[in-house]
Amino acid sequence: MDNQVSMYRTMCLIRRYEDKLAEIYTEGKTPLFSIAAGTIPGEMHLAAGQEPVAVGVISHLKKEDAVTAPHRPHHFAIAKGLDLRPMTAEIFGRQSGLSRGKGGHMHLFDPESHFSCSGIVGAGFPPAVGAALAFSRQGRGNVAVAFAGEGAANQGTFHESLNLAALWKVPVIFVIEDNHYAISVPKGQSTAVAKNSDRAQAYGIPGVYIPGNDVLAIAEAAQEAINRARKGQGPSLLEIETTRLYGHFQGDAETYLRSGEKESWQQEDPIAHFRSYLLAHHDLSEEEDGNIQREVRDLVEDAVNFARESQEPDVKEAFRDVFVES
């Protein structure tokens, strides 16, 4: 499969997955909403619209490269190649999940894919630097990528991590998703600089801002940063403009949005734009697109069915993998 078509397929798989979770999340939560009830317990942060960030960057990574992700992690996990079955079971809180159902959707860990994420804002920066330091010391030629939202760029962990990474010239790429809002706060009301990529200058590393939510432009910038890191030339900072087509979390009333703002984002759907581009350049046919849509639908349905049929953890699981006094 052509690389660009493969990228498109992954974006379609992410969107199908997120839309399906949005549908399932409401099960058991009506008419009286309870965050602990239903098929999927806990909060749910979906990444529809932000597929280009994950796919554009991760398309250049190897399986052995490390990725740390934030509380909105599904697009990164899927792009990194996590098995949808145990990933979905984890989100459903089932025993066959990646962490036996204990982590939920904000805490997906897969050592085989070198992927992790956290519900703590800005928590992924230091582990990514640590992984990159290990790669550098071992001479393995691998890189680490830390993804986070623009709100996380105001955390102390971000600046401390950039400082150490630049000082030690470790092979790490920091990627900030600028989806315009840190929960409900516009970027202009929370951040003193217009672009977080400008902050790279303070640490003597390259900083690049990629507007337009364009997967090909993102892939081009990411390739340069990743190649630079593999050559031992140190870290880079990318800030990528994107949009979240769902709210910050499922159930978000989004009263903070300006009139017509969300509708304008929907009209600029990055998957629809990429599909049109591929069709126009004859890299994708209508028949191939139909096959891709059926394939991703079947993959998502299979993962959901696996999760639904998986057992819930026994109560004794609460005492497994934790330290208890004897």
Image (tube, grey):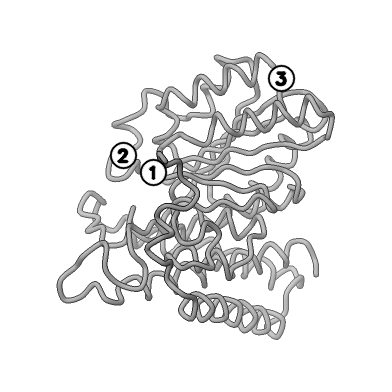
Viewer-proximal residue, 67 or 91?
91
Looking at the picture, which amino acid does disc 3 mark? Lys
Residue 301 position (above or below residue 76): below
Which residue is rendered at x = 75% and y = 51% of the image? 63
**Looking at the image, which residue sits at the far front?**
326
- Residue reaching furthest left? 32
Helix, strand or loop status at disc 3: loop
Q: Quadrant of residue 51?
A: bottom right
How far across and how far down the image is residue 181, in percent? 35, 43
Q: Residue at x 37, y 75 (%)?
A: 23
Q: Where, quadrant-wise, is the N terminus in this rendering?
A: bottom right
Read off the residue under disc 2. Answer: 186
Q: Is residue 9 left or right of residue 69?
A: right
Tell me residue 110's x, y (percent): 62, 53
Q: Nearer the viewer, mark 3 or mark 2?
A: 3
As helix, strand or loop, the secondary structure at mark 1 comes to loop
| Callouts 2 and 1 close, C-beta under 8 Å | yes
Which numbered marker is on residue 169? 3
Residue at 47%, 25% in the rendered image? 157
Query: x and y percent of residue 100 in the render?
Result: 50, 61
Q: CA distance from mark 3 to mark 2?
A: 33 Å
**Pointers 3 and 1 in contact (C-beta within 8 Å):** no
Q: CA distance from mark 3 to mark 1?
A: 30 Å
State the residue position of label 1: 180
Which comes sooner in the sequence, label 3 or label 2? 3
Q: Mark 1 is on which residue type?
A: His
